[in-house]
Amino acid sequence: MRVSVFVSVWVVFAAILFSGRTPAEAQAAPPDGAVFHKIIKDQMKAFAAGDANTAFSYATSALQQRFQTPAIYLDAVKRGYRPVYSPRDITFGTSKVTSKGPVQEVYLTDPDGEDWLALYSFEQQEDGSWRISGCYLTKSSGYPA
C-alpha cells in the first residue's frame, strides 16, 4: 500500500515572529532554497546509510507522530518513495511559497531510469529551523530545460 506523505501545515505566526513581517510580506518573500536543498540532501544521505533515526529527525513532529517510529518511517519511504529513497540523479527546481507554506521542487531519476518530481513542503519550527512536513511524488518528463 502506498503511503501518502503529503502533510502540509504552515505556521504563519512562526513566519511572522521570526521574520518580523506581516503575513502578506512573509508569503511574498521566497524562502532560501539553499536551506531546503541541504535538508533534503542530508535526509537522502541518511536514507542511503540506512540511518532511520537521522532521516526521521528531518520530519516535523506531526509527520513523526503519523509514522510513530523511525523504522516505520524508513520502511514507508523505502516502499512508497523509492525515487526519494535511492535516487540515481537529483536536480533541484524552484523554491516557491504557496498558500500552505514553502515548497521545494526536486527532479529525481530512480534506479530504473524513470523521472519523477518530488514536491517537498516545509514548516518552520519554533527555534527558526526548518523541517520537512511532506513530500508529494509524481511521474515527470524530466527537468525542464
Image (spheres, rainbow, N blue to C red):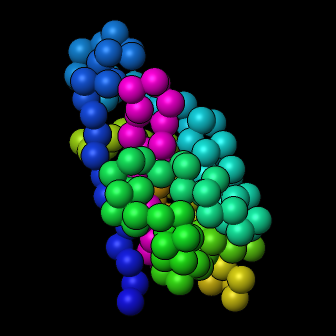
Q: Position of residue 44 (x, y in %)?
A: 67, 60
- Does the magenta-highlighted stretch encompass residue 105? no
Is residue 93 in sight in this rendering? no
- Does the magenta-highlighted stretch encompass residue 128? yes
Q: Is residue 140 above or below residue 96?
A: below
Q: Which residue shows up at 40% across the image and 64% down it?
A: 68
Q: Position of residue 140 (x, y in %)?
A: 51, 75
| Quadrant of the image containing the N terminus | bottom left
- Closer-to-camera residue (136/91): 136
Q: Which residue shows up at 69% across the image and 88% down it?
A: 112
Q: Residue furthest top?
A: 20
Q: How many marks?
A: 0
Q: Does residue 122 appear to the left or right of 39 in the view shown?
A: left
Q: Is residue 17 above or below residue 69?
A: above
Q: Position of residue 53 (x, y in %)?
A: 61, 57
Q: Which residue shows up at 62% across the image and 83% down it?
A: 114
The magenta stretch spans which residues? 122-143
**Residue 63 placement: quadrant:** bottom left
| Quadrant of the image containing the C terminus | bottom right
**Residue 126 placement: quadrant:** top left
Q: Does residue 15 appear to the left or right of 36 in the view shown?
A: left
- Closer-to-camera residue (85/52): 52
- Closer-to-camera residue (64/113): 64
**Residue 91 placement: quadrant:** bottom right
Is residue 39 in sight in this rendering? yes
